[in-house]
């Protein structure tokens, strides 16, 4: 798909939009964009507000329009936006499964740190409840979590026993060149200024340290087929919708070179398709929205959702094999 093309199979919701000032494309400063579709928060239903997904007429970068003000964006994040297991049979099963699929992330980061031959902290930005860091710490890594949400940082300490601070990357206590790796799993798409975070990560990394980022892939088959129903859109929390070339360009412009790419995540791709198809079955969404259910209904819905996840594996593996998976994970190092 060329930069001037628009998402195949999705009719634009309106004609060309001309913008000025802060509404121009953050990537190329173009003031022309086309709307692809409109939508609202269908997953957590925090608001009935409607937004557009637009695409730059010059570089093709997709984003939410208009961006909500920071004070309002905060209210689109439920209190329990990150995952903490429930103390019941369903929660214990979910925890076992999450550890199994998250081991894929752990292996990716372990390999990156090993090949960097650097010693230092593994800092996870947007750490949530800290399960990834807990699994890294068990394998001998020195770890630190950073998250905007105080409750998330608290959960990382209390539930998973890993050090975590509440704040932004630019206000972390880590010294320059103190990190062997900085990880950002599903973070950049939430930020008004992802460039600032990537540049700060570069400052924190040791000379041969690794930056590992993961974002939803707006060039995936799921987006082309499902449009606004694709859970990777996640209106209004996702401000940007990156394709692989958008993410490569961002990292390269910030002084990184790409070491490795991965288009499949055991944790995210199958579950993402399952949630796109049946968002009302998504366990986290039901918990956040406090959907009234009996224990038997909860177990039945969870098993149905898990079955849908299993059925999604062949499809998501195929799209990833064609480099059109619903997530992109990139490992990068500083340019020489």
Image (tube, rainbow, N blue to C red):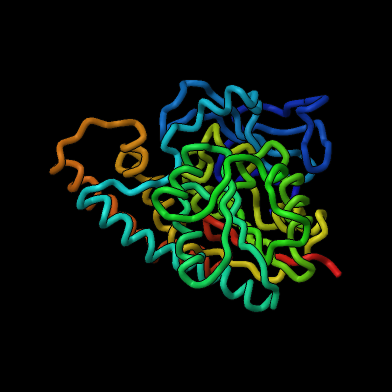
Residue at 82%, 36% in the rendered image: 30
- In the drawing, does residue 254 fall left or right of residue 88? right
Residue 111, image x, y percentages: 59, 75
Residue 167, image x, y percentages: 62, 40
Q: Nearer the viewer, residue 231 or 215?
A: 215
Question: Is residue 29 depicted above or below 2 in this figure?
Answer: above
Residue 277, image x, y percentages: 37, 46
Q: Nearer the viewer, residue 4 or 136?
A: 136
Quadrant (top left, top right, bottom left, bottom right) of the C terminus: bottom right
Question: Is residue 71 depicted above or below 6 in this figure?
Answer: above
- In the drawing, does residue 190 fall left or right of residue 264? right
Is residue 8 visible to the viewer in this orientation of the structure?
A: no
- Say how many tags the image has: 0
Residue 326, image x, y percentages: 52, 55
Q: Nearer the viewer, residue 237 or 164?
A: 164
Quadrant (top left, top right, bottom left, bottom right) of the N terminus: bottom right
- In the drawing, does residue 88 fall left or right of residue 20? left
Is residue 185 visible to the viewer in this orientation of the structure?
A: yes
Residue at 82%, 25% in the rendered image: 21
Residue at 82%, 54% in the rendered image: 253
């Amino acid at each position: 798909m060329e930069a001037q093309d628009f998402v195949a199979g999705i009719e634009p919701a309106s004609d060309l939009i001309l913008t000025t000032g802060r509404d121009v494309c953050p990537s190329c400063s173009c003031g022309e964009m086309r709307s692809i579709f409109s939508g609202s928060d269908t997953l957590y239903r925090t608001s009935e507000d409607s937004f557009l997904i637009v695409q730059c007429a010059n570089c093709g970068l997709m984003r939410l329009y208009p961006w909500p003000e920071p004070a309002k964006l905060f209210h689109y994040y439920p209190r329990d936006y990150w995952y903490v297991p429930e103390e019941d049979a369903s929660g214990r099963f979910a925890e076992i499964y999450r550890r199994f699929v998250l081991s894929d992330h752990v292996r990716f980061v372990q390999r990156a740190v090993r090949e960097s031959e650097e010693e230092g902290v593994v800092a996870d930005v947007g750490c949530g409840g800290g399960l990834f860091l807990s699994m890294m710490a068990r394998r001998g890594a020195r770890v630190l979590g950073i998250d905007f949400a105080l409750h998330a940082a608290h959960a990382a300490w209390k539930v998973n026993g890993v050090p975590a601070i509440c704040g932004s990357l630019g206000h972390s206590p880590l010294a320059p060149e103190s990190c062997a790796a900085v990880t950002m799993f599903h973070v950049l798409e939430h930020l008004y200024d992802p460039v600032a975070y990537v540049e700060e990560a570069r400052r924190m990394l040791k000379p041969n340290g690794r930056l590992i980022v993961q974002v939803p892939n707006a060039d995936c088959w799921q987006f082309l087929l499902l449009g606004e129903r694709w859970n990777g859109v996640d209106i209004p929390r996702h401000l940007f919708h990156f394709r692989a070339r958008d993410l490569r360009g961002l990292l390269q412009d910030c002084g990184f070179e790409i070491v490795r790419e991965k288009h499949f995540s055991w944790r995210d791709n199958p579950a993402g398709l399952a949630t796109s198809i049946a968002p009302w079955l998504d366990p986290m969404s039901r918990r956040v929205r406090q959907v009234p259910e009996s224990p038997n209904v909860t177990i039945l819905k969870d098993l149905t959702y898990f079955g849908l996840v299993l059925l999604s594996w062949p499809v998501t593996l195929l799209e990833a094999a064609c480099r059109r998976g619903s997530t992109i994970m990139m490992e990068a190092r500083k340019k020489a």
